Amino acid sequence: MANFLAQFQTIKSSSDHIVISVEDVSGLWPTVKKGFEERLPFKRACLNNKTRNSVFVENLPAEFILTTDARLRSRFPHEQYLFWFREPYATIILVTCEDLDEFKTILKPRLKLIVQNDEREWFIVFVSRAHPSNDQATKMAKKVYSKLEVDFSSRKRERCCKLDIHSPEANFWEDLDFKIVESIRNTLDRRVQFYEDELRKLSEQRFMPVWNFCNFFILKESLAFIFEMAQLHEDALREYDELELCYSETVNVPGKQRDFGGLERGDEQAALLNSGNKPLNEIVQDDSFREFEFRQYLFACQSKLLFKLNRPYEVASRGYSFIISFSKSLTSYESILPFCMREVWVVTASLALIGATSSHYKEGLVALDVEKEFHRLEGDLYSLCRLKFMRLAYMVGYGTYLERSPVNSASLSMLPWPKPAVWPSIPPDASSEVLAKEKMILQASPRPKHFGIQRKQLPLEPSILLREANRRRASLSAGNMLEIFDGRPIDGVVSPSNKPHTAAMVRTNSIPGNFESSIDRPMRLAEIYVAAEHALRNTISNPDLLKSLSSLEEFEQKYLELTKGAADNYHRSWWKRHGVVLDGEIAAVSFGHGNFDLAAKSYEKVCALYAGEGWHDLLAEVLPNLAECQKILNDEAGYLSSCVRLLSLDKGLFLNKERQAFQSEVVRLAHSEMKQPVPLDVSSLITFSGNMGPPVKLCDGDPGTLSVNIWSGFPDDITLDSLHLTLTATFNTDEGVKALKSSTPIVLNPGKNTITLALPPQKPGSYVLGVLTGQIGKLKFRSHSFSKGGPAESDDFMSYEKPVRPILKVFNPRPLVDLTAAISSALLINEPQWIGIIVRPIDYSLKGAVLHIDTGPGLKIEESHAIEMESHTDVMDKTTMENRSLGKKNNCHSLKIEDGQVEFPDWASETNSVMWIPVRAVSDQLPRGSSSVDSHKRNIVDGMRTIALKLEFGMSHNQIFDRTMAVHFTDPFHVSTRVADKRNDGTLLLQVTLHSQVNAMLTVNDAWIDLQGGFVHTGKGDGRPTSGFFPLAIASTTRAGILFSIRIGKVSGDEANRLDADTILNIKYRISGHRTRGAHPPVKVDSTKSDDTEQDLTFRSALVFQRPVLDPCLAVGFLPLPSSGLRVGQLVTMKWRIERLKNFKDEVLYEVNANNVNWMIAGRKRGHISLSPEQGSRVVISILCIPLVAGYVQPPQLGLPDIKEANISCNPAGPHLVCVLPAALSSSFCVPA
Amino acid sequence: MATTACFIIVSRNDIPIYEAEVGSTVKREDAAHLHQFILHAAQDIVQDLAWTTSAMFLKAIDRFNDLVVKLFLNLVSIHTRLMLLHDSRNDDGIKSFFQEVHELYIKTLLNPLYLPGSRITSSHFDTKVRALARKYL
């Protein structure tokens, strides 16, 4: 059966659709052919699939072939079953007959003969050529057709239909379609059944020695092909799947060694999508097929069907796993296959698969997740291809141009080297190529890592190629390894120092004559490259791939294409990590080509990915590259931020030296010529927090200092030119925050630094740390992060969410200190007195406080005397007070006053204290005594003095407490006088009462009166009381009286001047009070005087004496008014009688004053009257008046302007008001009409 | 014991919060990098898988040559992933390892001073994980 393979394949390729045979009995085909073929392909043909479920096939292609056609006639019967699929699925018998007899005699037997072969599905199409107008012919045709139906149609199946050429019935074509499809369906079912039976039989014998896979294959594929022809691709695919399964089960039967295949030229080009790559009969081996070709063939068939089913996604998915598993098979046969066959095959297979699937794939046709998955697979294919391509490139010496990134390293370093039986040896005439490779190796110095990072490069090879290649050479034993490394440093990592040396050595070794003997000595790296290149040239038949490996430029182009493809597809599959990582590879190539802009963009993406997810190890690989790009691009901001990010990575990732290099870059840039200040976020590098413990507490308006811990992630000390730290109020965020400044340069050591910042007065509230900003050169940095107080590395992302501890609390304004007067009772006026001021700090230190004392008018400080200050508790303590009264001074401190300012001593900063200020209230006014007549009482305000106090305290005297205090000063006594007795001889007994005004004991030692003119003391003395009365003690608020006897004396000429002066009461007294209670002995200004010679104080008070008024010259009397009363308009005579009491003057001037409105006066208002000088002479002055207004009015007054009022005695005095009645009714005004 | 194994705990924000090389082979200098890279790339797969399964233990979500990435989803603290990159064949051991480490991780979470999602710096945790690795892997 295997012999039919070639034939089978040709048949298969020639017939790909269903055949319908046409038995043209009556030569009608040319007439109806057109109409029939118009029906092709069949629409919505209902067929049965393998599981006998009906399936609608949208388009079923078919072909009508006459039975007389050579294609159907030339077949041998034995081929029929084997290639049954190409046999007709239906037979249409075209007949016509217009004569019943003819039908019976000729046509019927002939038809019977045709249809006797039961295996065929047939039906008869009766064509009526009768014209509709020809009734006879039409009738005849009908008759014949009915006869035909009777003979050939059965109840089960309608096998006849009639076509009227001239006027076809409306449903004829549908009927025809139905009949054809029905026949096809039946045939298909029968054939499928047949093949299945055959296959079952074969399967049963599978484990028998006679079993032949080729037979099974032909049957199975025939079945699959039948399905495929019937457009039942799903079923066809299933057949191929089963076939593959069966093959994989049978191919590796132990004990049967078969050829694998793949040794022919061109085999390395994957044929996994090209089923016609090789004729099947060429790959037959024994009773089966060669694995290498056959598995690809099967996959090609499957993928073809899948593409027909429009499932490119599945092709990709199956293809990927196929490539993986096939690659494994290739590995196991690697020793017999050409060098690097596996790698090349995978590259070509992946590329072919990518090309085919992506060209069949249309966006948006499938569900989103399928689309994602498709792109993912494409990405996988690309990266697989890329990986193998890189491996090939490495073998031919492009390894130094490959980026040693984690992705390349991870894939390549775990991928084993190819394991050929014998490593290819160098061709004899390749010396020039070896030289070229040597040159390339020497030229391609490994790209220097930026910042002088001396990390070990990631490997791109599972083991050293030099060792591997030499080991695999048959002639070399492992013992020669030392020799290998002697000449060349390992793997192209050339240290600069021994470069020339090696180069020289290489040259001596590469003279052409040596190559024959090179079998025995280990190959050098360049030789390995050349050998591999030659071997690959033998392996690879694909010109594209050869070209891609031929030069560095071509390689890079291909590499870029693959990388881009992979990255792009991964991005579209939402596998961002895969995609972004490959972007990084593209960036590396761009970087190599000097396309730094693109490189920087891609590197940024990679860095963002790693940084965002916190994979520091990986970030540390890429970030230096990004930094380098930015440096070259002169992107200062970016470069700086990259440097900062490098510094803020885990410390273990870089050596200290490298970190120092980063820092020096930052510092160098910061101090370089930058156009404008560059802002930079250093949150990850410089972190800060407040001190542990409770927040700093400040009173409103107080400045303070805030100490902040700053962790520097810099490896070395770094100088910050200035530092600003904002405080954010927790109560009100939109208020403009003020920064705390420290403009002096600050040097940050690595690790924790404690910085103290001056804190200007803040508004009340609680504050948290805001942002740290500052400047390094022209670099404006900014840090938002707060460290928890632990080391700087523990900056986890959650710390932002943590409620931040307040660092500063500023309290609402409250009283911080109180100044009150120590006493409320009055002090002595005009004497130096202590004013006590109690200073009471309220939970606030008064350290360094200064008190400004400003005395009001009438009060002055006795500056010659020091201010005293003592503790308040001492003052209140009784024993101390007693001590004080005994003259002992305890804990009393003297303070100096300068310019009205007193500085507080330190001891008084926390405790209540009393400050004693010596003052003197000055009053020029002499106190006046009061008498029963002149009850003048001194106003209390007169003794009031104010003292304005201003206390400046707090950290920098920022707190100010103002208070104006009223201090009451008074005289020691208030004096009141009373005439206790008055004798006829003018002697008066004057009682002087002394009221004590102060809260202290007063002792009167002496008292006397300096009398005013007109008064004299009785007796000869000076009027002092008997000295035995003194001292007279007067307790506070008590009274004492002293009697003086005086008399009115003559007023002499001299004394007339003293007439107006006051009488002065002089009292000498002492006071024994204490300053804590009130008035006290005056401050001794001159402290040299001893306490014993205490001076008496003198109190002087003016007493008002009035000489008795007993000197009237004239008496004026107002004569009574008429009893009838006064009326308006009625004349009245006002009369005054003046009587001379003393001989005084001859003429008297009088004057009558009256209100013009009220009175009309007739007569002389002013004039002299002559009065006889004798005592008792009288004269009456009368004036005629008319009252003008009714009511109580003031009567006219008589005045005597020349005579003093004291000399006039009014007896009785004139009335103040008189009653004026309204005018009487007058009839003269009431004239009747 | 597996010759190569890299254990990592990834928080739900894809941030590695704990890493440990627990293989028995002498640690290659560059191995950590590669392992990190592989595990990081596997996050792509995890993100797809995590929503499709309710199982906590996912076998072999990714293969990288001989190395296999295994995953243990921690449902307690949403989608914290315990991931192991290894070349061991001992599946049961790995499962037990995951379970015990998971328990350890829960204990760590219960620590009031541990901020969920932050790096696990506890040396005790580290010691325990390494002991478990020796025991099971």
Image (spheres, coloured by chain):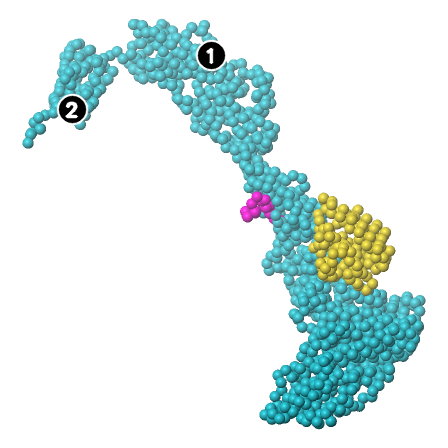
Chain colours: A cyan, B yellow
Image quadrant assignment for residue A873: top right
Q: Which quadrant would the N terminus of chain A be assigned to in this image?
A: bottom right
**Where residue A20 sits in the image (x, y, percent)?**
73, 85
Q: Chain of mark 2?
A: A
State the mark number for residue A1192: none
What residue does disc 2 label?
Answer: A1222
Q: Secondary structure at mark 2?
A: loop
Q: Which residues are magenta?
A: A723-738
**Where residue B103 sits in the image (x, y, percent)?**
78, 49
Relative to the observer, which residue lies in front, A604 or A316? Answer: A316
What residue does disc 1 label?
Answer: A1034
**With A455 as the anchor, is A368 left or right in this view?**
left
**Where residue B107 sits in the image (x, y, percent)?**
76, 46
- Tell me which label, 2 or 1, sits earlier in the chain: 1
Q: Residue at x 81, y 78 (%)?
A: A194
Q: Residue at x 60, y 47 (%)?
A: A726
Q: Residue at x 69, y 45 (%)?
A: A789
Q: Chain of mark 1?
A: A
Residue type marked 1: Ile
Q: Secondary structure at mark 1?
A: strand
**Where residue A856 sits in the image (x, y, percent)?**
45, 29
